[in-house]
Image (tube, coloured by chain):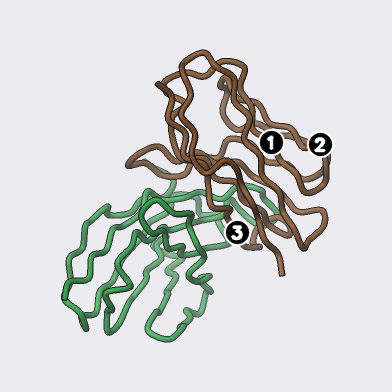
Amino acid sequence: RKEVEQDPGPFNVPEGATVAFNCTYSNSASQSFFWYRQDCRKEPKLLMSVYSSGNEDGRFTAQLNRASQYISLLIRDSKLSDSATYLCVVSGGSGTYKYIFGTGTRLKVLA
Amino acid sequence: SQTIHQWPATLVQPVGSPLSLECTVEGTSNPNLYWYRQAAGRGLQLLFYSVGIGQISSEVPQNLSASRPQDRQFILSSKKLLLSDSGFYLCAWSPGLAPLTQYFGPGTRLLVL
């Protein structure tokens, strides 16, 4: 089993749609969780951290389910500019150097 | 504010040639520094990390090496490149260990022919 697993997609959605991605992780000791966005041929950029109670940033909502070991990202009112690959990132545990990256979920928002 | 630079942006090298990629960070001191490689269609693979000058930890045995000659400088090297070394090389920094966030440089796209 991979340490961090994501559906590679692509998810093709129309503008204005709501789309959700899930990511599962295998290390129950993981304590830090992030979503990064990566545009084609560019570096990953932090989208948001994921907190235990869930958190929202504008149209983006992240949730953490420790019991089932998955995190999710919900994008509401999709924009063309949201088209990108979304990377799920999990740390190996508090105080660790190691961040494990998923292979990403590709999103295409269509006009 | 902090910025991270990488160069060159792209590189085409023959098999068996040496490699030197450089990464520098500005606006912070004593950062943790990381080298990742992203092969086509695959996730980011951690190659090396460093918590201080001269301190390098390797994640994966390979023909690459890393050095940190100065606090905010991280260099990735190889004496002889292999075809399998092709990929997108990303340098990242963080202000400390997890759960602190990592920030990435613009990357170097390497093609070994």
Query: Dot 3 surroundings within 10 Å: few (below 14), some, or many (20 or more)?
Result: some
Alpha carbon separation for disc pair 1 and 2:
8 Å
The residue positioned 33% from the left and 62% from the top of the image is: A84
Work out whether mark 1 precedes mark 2 in sequence or the reverse, and give the earlier one. Answer: 2
Mark 2: which amino acid? Pro
Report the residue marked by disc 3.
B103
In the shown orientation, is residue B62 left or right of residue A82? right
Which chain shows up in green? A
Front residue (pair B103, B99): B103
**Image x and y of residue B83, in percent:** 42, 20
Alpha carbon separation for disc pair 2 and 3:
21 Å
Check disc 3 and report its element: helix, strand or loop. strand
Report the residue marked by disc 2.
B69
Q: Colour of chain B?
A: brown
Residue B7 lies in what quarter of the image? Answer: top right
Report the residue marked by disc 1.
B75
Whether residue B59 is situated above or below residue A21 in the rendered picture = above
Check disc 1 and report its element: helix, strand or loop. strand
Work out whether mark 1 precedes mark 3 in sequence or the reverse, and give the earlier one. Answer: 1
